[in-house]
Image (tube, rainbow, N blue to C red):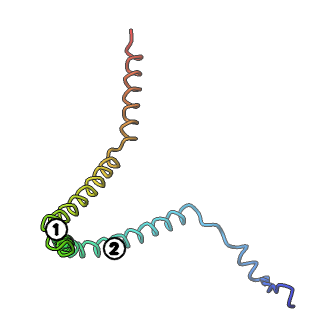
């Protein structure tokens, strides 16, 4: 038996075959009831999850409001640390320390501006505008043909 695969045979008795033969496919009424029951169950699940999500909403808003100042202070602390490190490294050169602080702020401002512009381009709905323009032109042409003398 080492090289051959073992298969278990499953046989139905005559009574089992008779029961299977008597089964009928669900009719339209049964299918509709099952579908409506599934939809109702899904709606109940959605309602429960929505209630849970709405209960968490005030805490989520509060945490998001608190997150902004924390991120700002963390970034400013890092910039001050980097500026102080440059100041100490170059034997008290205040100009290089201030320049380091300024360059870090400038780099972040440029990166944010590039990201915002990229996001604005994605929100322009260029394809929808083109489609709307084509639709508008085709409607104008159709109107001219129908109302031409």
The residue lying at 30 percent from left, 71 percent from top is 50
Residue 125, placed above or below residue 71: above
Q: How many marks?
A: 2
Q: Looking at the image, can residue 66 be seen? A: no
Q: Which residue is mark 1?
A: 97
**Sequence order check, earlier mark of 2 and 1:** 2
Considering the numbered disc 2 on the image, is that residue within a helix, a strand or a loop? Answer: helix
Say above or below: 149 vs 126: above
Between residue 94 and residue 119, name the one nearer to us: 94
Q: Quadrant of residue 142?
A: top left
Q: Is residue 3 visible?
A: yes
Q: Mark 1 and mark 2 in contact (Cβ < 8 Å)?
A: no
Give the number of the disc on residue 114. Answer: none
Residue found 79% across the figure and 82% down from its top: 14
Q: Residues within 10 Å of mark 1 (few under 14, many from 20)?
A: many
Q: Is residue 19 left or right of residue 69?
A: right
Q: Is residue 117 left or right of residue 96?
A: right
Q: Position of residue 136 (x, y in %)?
A: 36, 29
C-alpha span from label 2 to label 1? 52 Å
Q: Nearer the viewer, residue 64 or 121?
A: 121
On-image quarter of the N terminus: bottom right
**Among the 4 quarters of the image, the one containing residue 144:** top left
Residue drawn at x 31%, y 52% as measured from the top left: 119
Where does the C terminus fall, quadrant-wise? Answer: top left
Q: Secondary structure at mark 1?
A: helix
Q: Nearer the viewer, residue 14 or 107?
A: 107
Number of residues whose C-alpha sits closer than 10 Å to that of mark 2, classed few (under 14), some (14–19) or many (20 or more)? few
Foreground mark, 2 or 1, reads 1
- In the rendered image, residue 103, in percent from the top left (x then y), is placed at 21, 61
In the rendered image, which residue does mark 2 sit on?
49
Residue 27: horizontal and vertical position, in percent? 59, 63
Coordinates of residue 63 in the picture (x, y in percent): 20, 74
């Amino acid at each position: 038996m080492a090289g051959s695969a073992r298969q278990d045979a499953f046989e139905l008795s005559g009574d089992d075959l008779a029961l299977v033969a008597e089964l009928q496919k669900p009719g339209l009424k049964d299918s509709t009831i099952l579908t409506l029951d599934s939809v109702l169950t899904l709606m109940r699940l959605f309602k429960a999850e929505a209630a849970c999500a709405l209960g968490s909403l005030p805490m989520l808003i509060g945490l998001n409001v608190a997150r902004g100042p924390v991120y700002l202070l963390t970034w400013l602390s890092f910039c001050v640390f980097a500026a102080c490190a440059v100041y100490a490294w170059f034997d008290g050169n205040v100009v290089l320390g201030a320049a380091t602080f300024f360059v870090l702020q400038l780099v972040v401002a440029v990166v944010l501006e590039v990201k915002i512009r990229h996001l604005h381009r994605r929100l322009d709905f260029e394809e929808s505008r083109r489609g709307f323009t084509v639709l508008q032109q085709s409607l104008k042409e159709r109107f001219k043909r129908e109302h031409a003398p």
